[in-house]
Structure formats: structure tokens, C-alpha cells
Image (cartoon, rainbow, N blue to C red):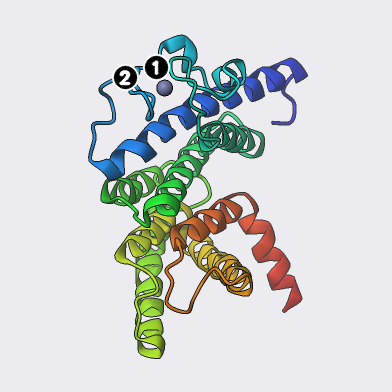
Amino acid sequence: MTGAAPATIVFGAVYATVVGLCVGSFLNVVAWRLPRGESIVRPRSRCPHCSASIAARDNVPLLSFVILRGRCRTCGESIAWRYPAVEAGSGVLWLASWLVFGPTFDGLLAAVFCSLMLVLAIIDASHLLLPDPLTWGGIGVGLAGSFAVSWTTPRDALFGAAVGAGGLLLLIGLWYLLRRVRGMGLGDVKMLAAVGAFLGVGGTLLTLFLASLIGALAGLLLMVRGRLGWSSRLPFGVFLAMGAVVSLFFGPRLIAAYASLL
Ligand SMILES: [Zn+2]
């Protein structure tokens, strides 16, 4: 974005953040309803405690949470902090996509990819589930986007999806041979295939590496604190999402740094 007037950059950054906040609000709806088999478009959002439908003025991302001091206007029950956190997270990711890729198709696809990773991470964290419409949908959008995006090609995206699915299936198989338990599910396989469709082969391998690292650290931490046994399942999709977002924004730099070490 060099050369653009400062006012244009500021306006764009604010705009991207506001869109990201609104998308985050929608992701909250998807994360609540999709695992429960409810429609995503109807009816209006309701308070999970008193079922009062939430008025538009109380449904403004972040702002309503602050104005209502984190409580439902009708029953006064506290609203889970997860809702504003997801909205803020989405706002930050859309802002980052704008700052890194600018007002380009790259920027838009990056933001869509981040939103997908965010919603998959929330659903996996609370349900240990990665819904097919999101993973298969992601594979489709990623492959379609590869025709127009600058960081990958359709060929690389197709190989990325195959390497992602194949690599994770191999890991699951090895883990099963070693420990006789299924550490991950087919949802994780489809999710990494979607990451591959968006990021290509390099980004997929980096994502798998980072996710394994983050997952191992998180697992060790939980075991040390006595909250996890060998057979417990961790939401690996959360770690995949973290690895994928890092790969998107820092992948080329990380790979270059690693190559210079060799
Ligand atoms: Zn209520």
C-alpha cells in the first residue's frame, strides 16, 4: 500500500475492522447453530437464558456488549465473554489481512480464510467437531480462489489439498499403530485439505508443523497440570487454525528464515 494517501489507509483500515467485527458476529451465530443443526439465517438471535429475541440495537458487535455491561437486557443474565472475543478476534484478523495484503483480492481471500479458521476453531473447541459444510466449503472456495490469488496457483492448491489430507491421514495411522487410539478425526483431515486448497503445499506443511508444535505444547501443559490423560482428545482443529493463520501471514518469511539456516 505504499503511495496511498494516509487518509485512505486509515479509512480502509477502519472499514476492514468494522466489516471484520460484523463478520465475527455472524461467525458466533454459525458456531452456535451449525453444530445444533439449526438454520443460520432464521430466526433472529435469542438470549440462550430467557429466549428473548435480541433487538438490532443490542446486536451491534462489541459496542452492545459494552453498553449492556455484558448482560441480557431482558433477564440480566451475563453474556458469555466468548461472543465479544470472537467479534474482536475477527476484527483484528480482517484488519491484519488489509494491512498485509491491501485492498486486493488477496486481502479479501485472506480475510475469508481467517474467518473460516476462526469459526472452525470455536466449534472444535466446544464440540470436538469440524462440520462438513465448512471444511468441504473451504476446500471449494480455496480451489476457486487459487485461480485469482497471487500466493498460489490452481496446481499448487490442488496438491496442497492432497498433501494436507494425505499427510494427516498418515499421521493418524501412525498414531493409531503406536497408541491404538484415534488422536484425530476425519474432520481434521478435511480441515487441513481446506488449508491446502487456500495456501498451497508450502503453507500446508508449515501449518501441520506449527499445529503439531502448538498441540504438543498445549498437551504437555495440560498434562503437567493434571488435566489431561494419554487418551484424552484435544481439539486439534484449534491448533490447525492457529498454525494456518500464522502460515498465511508469516509463511514466506518463516520458510525463508528456515532455508537460510540450512
Ligand atoms: Zn436473557
Residue 43 position within the rendered picture, expressed as x and y whole percent measured from the top left: 26, 21
Residue 54 badge: 1
- The kind of secondary structure element at disc 1 is loop
The amino acid on which the numbered mark 2 sits, given as a three-letter code, is Arg
User: Where is 85 relative to 122, above or below?
Assistant: above
The amino acid on which the numbered mark 1 sits, given as a three-letter code, is Ile
Q: Residue at x 37, y 79 (%)?
A: 170
Residue 1 placement (x, y as % from top left):
69, 31
Q: Give the total number of marks visible in the rendering.
A: 2
Q: Which residue is mark 2?
A: 44
The one of 171 and 197 positioned closer to us in this rendering: 171
Ligand 1 within 8 Å of disc 1? The answer is: no
Q: CA distance from mark 1 to mark 2?
A: 7 Å
* 200 relative to 6 in the view: left or right: left
Q: Residues within 10 Å of mark 2 (few under 14, many from 20)?
A: few
Residue at 62% x, 35% y: name it.
92
Q: For the C terminus, give its image quadrant.
A: bottom right
Cβ atoms under marks 1 and 2 closer than 8 Å: yes
Residue at image location 52% in from the left, 24% down from the top? 19
* Ligand 1 image position (quadrant): top left
Question: Residue 74 location, x and y as percent?
Answer: 43, 15
197 and 231: which one is in front?
231
Residue 131 placement, left or right of 27: left
Q: Is residue 245 left or right of residue 155?
A: right
Q: Which callout, 1 or 2, points at the residue further toward the start of the chain?
A: 2
Front residue of 50 and 128? 50
Q: State which quadrant residue 195 falls in.
A: bottom left
